[in-house]
Image (tube, rainbow, N blue to C red):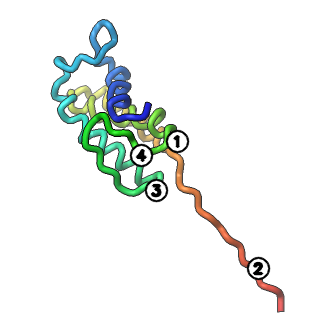
Amino acid sequence: MKTAREVFDRAFALLGYTDRMGNLDATKFAPQYKQSVAYCQTVLDDICRIEGNGFHQIEDLDAELPISSTSIDLVMPYGLAMYLAQIDGDGTQQQLFSLQYSQRLGYVPKPQKKVTLNYSPIE
């Protein structure tokens, strides 16, 4: 996965918001679809803050995400699923994905800090 649309489709599949063929049912879940970019942006902001990437604005679902593949694959779909379940008023799914998202935020790679040791001669 590289784009917001792929993450969004994965979140819908996690929630079971698909038709009987496994495809996204955009007509049935139109309210969630309308707010998809806003919620993708919210989850992206959380991950960018942890990765130390700064702020990145996405304009549409076809935008490539400027975060690590680990964050895209393991974290972002669960955060997005949490928000989508909240829109739907599905408290059970929202709690489940909230817990998973909170735990998975620990998988987000953190920026590496350089440490330099300066040894001074003993006088």
Q: Is residue 65 above or below residue 17?
A: below
**Sequence-earlier tag: 2 or 4:** 4
Q: CA distance from mark 3 to mark 2?
A: 30 Å
Marks 1 and 4: which is nearer the front? 4
Residue 55: assigned label: none
Q: Amino acid at mark 2?
A: Tyr
Instruction: For the residues labelled 2 and 4, say whether their Cβ atoms are less than 8 Å apart.
Output: no
**Mark 2 surroundings: few (<14), some (14-19) or many (≥20) residues within 10 A:** few
**Sequence-earlier tag: 2 or 1:** 1
- Quadrant (top left, top right, bottom left, bottom right) of the N terminus: top left
Residue 119: assigned label: 2
Report the side of 102 relative to 87 (left or right): right
Q: Amino acid at mark 1?
A: Tyr
Instruction: For the residues labelled 3 and 2, say whether their Cβ atoms are less than 8 Å apart.
Output: no
Residue that label 1 marks: 107
**Sequence-earlier tag: 1 or 4:** 4
Determine whether the residue tagged by mark 3 lies in a helix, strand or loop. Answer: loop
Marks 2 and 4: which is nearer the front? 4
